[in-house]
Image (cartoon, rainbow, N blue to C red):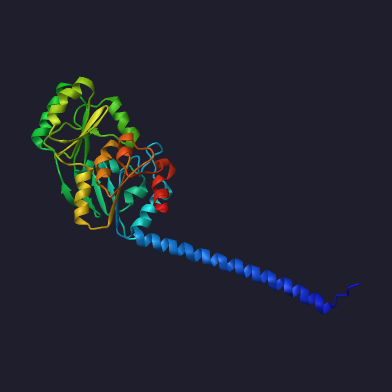
Amino acid sequence: MVIVTTYEKCKFFYTRKEIVITLISIESQCEFIIKIENSFKKIRKRILLRYERLFFDMDGTLYNNKFHEVSEKTFKMLNELQGQGHFVALCTSRCQTELKNLPSCMRNFQFDCMISDGGALILDRHKEVLEMNCISKATMKTIDSFCKERNLVYRYSTRNGNYFGTPYSKYAHDIYFHLYLNSPIFKPYENDDVLNLLVFCEGKDKEKFRPLIKDLGIVEFFDCFEIRANQIDKATAVKKIMDFHKFDTTYCFGDGTNDVDMLKMADVGVAMGNACDALKEVSDVVIGRVDEDGIYNFLMRK
């Protein structure tokens, strides 16, 4: 029979305790090392991203029109990017009035630059005008007359307003309200400085209208034309900012037909998973959908 003394019992107990302490110590060291590695990853990410410009479309890209929200993760990423010293810009076809019904987080976010009206208006971070390109008044009068003669609905935007130039239909009103939670008011055109037009027309009316706008900047949709001054679009506006602010890489994010030229011009053109096929074809990368935190997940992996 083996007799175990009190001393030996104590010795055995403390040996086990020491082993447990040692294991705990090793585990703590591993956790510490993992935390250090994660910190270095974050620092490395900041270094890699330091000199980048990022231009974001609004609807279908930052903003989920179905639920009328910007996800918490997407908004967090915008703040982190700015905090790391990146140039974070908005590039949208919305006019300034249409931006007022966004969630408060987006209304209050101070973009380094804001391009609105499809590229016709460029504002700095303090919302002071850097450049404003209007459709000529002669062209506006021609378009106004054409729409009135054919009972076509059109909407026009100015620096501080958004209006229907002809009596609007329920269809036009509902489209606007569904997208923006507001709708233009009716105000006949009277020599206003117009930045952006949306003319609702289809079929034969489209073909009759097309020659009138051949020298303007246009994007054609199945039921309307988006119209700006000649050679004015999102891409030309982004290019002007690129020439002014020197950064290593330019990323452009979008989802629609009016984002095609912008993505083609970017160093990295990023199409949302919910983007139209035409945009996906010209993009450098297709990421997750707006309702899947596509932007956040893509930038976290970069």
**Which quadrant of the view contains residue 166?**
top left
Residue 17 drawn at (x, y percent): 71, 72
Left or right of 120, for residue 272: right
Residue 162 drawn at (x, y percent): 23, 37
Which quadrant of the figure contains the N terminus? bottom right
Residue at the spot 14% in from the left edge and 41% down from the top edge: 134
Residue 232 drawn at (x, y percent): 17, 42
Residue at the spot 26% in from the left edge and 27% down from the top edge: 223
Please tell me whether residue 194 is drawn above or below residue 22 in the rendered image: above
Q: Residue furthest bottom?
A: 7
**Which quadrant of the view contains residue 209?**
top left
Left or right of 28, for residue 53: left
Considering depth in this image, is 31 or 84 the residue closer to the camera? 31
Residue 235 makes an appearance in the image: yes
Residue at the spot 14% in from the left edge and 31% down from the top edge: 213
Residue at the spot 60% in from the left edge and 66% down from the top edge: 27
